[in-house]
Image (cartoon, helix red, strand yellow):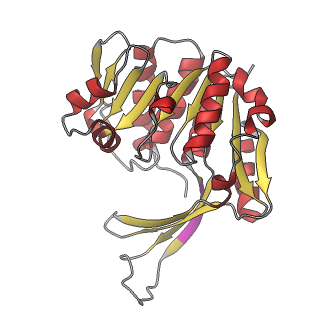
Amino acid sequence: MIDVAVVGSLHLDIMVAAPRLPGRDETLIGSAWHYKCGGKGGNQAVAAARFGAHTAFGGQTGQDDFGERLRANLAAAGVDITLVGIDAGQGSGMSVAISEDSGEYGAVVVSGANLTIDPAAIISAWSPLWDAKVLLLQNEIPEPVSLAAAKAAKAKDARILLNAAPARKMSPEFLALVDVLVVNRVEAEMLAGTGDMAAALAALHSPSRDVVLTRGGDGLMLMTRDGRRTDIPALPVKLISSHGAGDCFCGALAARLAAGEAIEAVCHFATEAAGRFVSTPQAG
């Protein structure tokens, strides 16, 4: 049986190092570049698999070199890519990110084949995913696709885990299907309409949903469906880079939820996993 099914995005990121972002009509000389397989869906699936979950992916690439790299990256991590489709008429999702010497960056994302998934077709085409213990979703593919997936998996008693990133408005119908909602401070404020994180946590909570509000080095706030709040501190580590920490956290969370652990214990584990991630040099 599949432990964690992920329906989401796949992007191949081209990472460029430069002294600063270029101005209009300006050409700068950069110092290095490399490929990085990304997309929140892909990153979280890889993390879930690395934390021991039998993980399968539903998504789409183009029929191109970028798509081959993205599928190979998932497979190398042990993710089942049987249901990763190929749209021959669209390029794979990609981005170009420029990292400044100061550590700031700017990026342009082209979603490509991630936007052409047919929400009606996946009900039968991706049927093996709906028997998973946990369905993990994000906001980088169109909501109709995520909604269709959530409905199909919920009908088979899967637990629906939504990482509401990037921040965007979501329909009440979709949110009503979510069993565990993960948001950061930006997403919490946008969805709840308040910068008071305690108030946002309470506003996003419901008797059928646990809410996890991550705050980076300030740890996280958890409100379980019974209305009980728990604050979990971040792991005290030396920060190297926070890039990708949220995806590591969500993958760890999904893996442990699928293993049947209680939400508070799961949050402790995922917090420690994210702490170790941000304090470990990542391969370029």
User: Residue 75: which quarter of the image?
Assistant: top right
**Type of secondary structure dominating the magenta stretch:** strand
User: Residue 22: which quarter of the image?
Assistant: bottom left
Q: Is residue 198 left or right of residue 262?
A: left
Q: Is residue 173 left or right of residue 128?
A: left
The correct choice, above or below, for 264 with respect to 178 in the image is above
Q: Is residue 46 visible?
A: no
Q: Which residues are magenta?
A: 33-37
Residue 59, image x, y percentages = 69, 45
Residue 272, image x, y percentages = 41, 28
Q: Is residue 39 visible?
A: yes
Q: Is residue 34 magenta?
A: yes
At 29% from the left and 12% from the top, the residue drawn is 228
Figure quadrant of the C terminus: bottom right
At 59% from the left and 32% from the top, the residue drawn is 48
Q: Is residue 274 left or right of residue 134?
A: left
Closer to the camera in the image, 62 or 98: 62
The correct choice, above or below, for 198 with respect to 58 in the image is above
At 34% from the left and 63% from the top, the residue drawn is 103
Figure quadrant of the N terminus: top right
Residue 196, image x, y percentages = 18, 35
The correct choice, above or below, for 20 with respect to 8 in the image is below
Q: Is residue 115 left or right of residue 265?
A: right
Closer to the camera in the image, 107 or 189: 189
Furthest residue in direction left, as rendered: 196
Q: Is residue 229 magenta?
A: no
Residue 234, image x, y percentages = 31, 31
Total labels drawn: 0
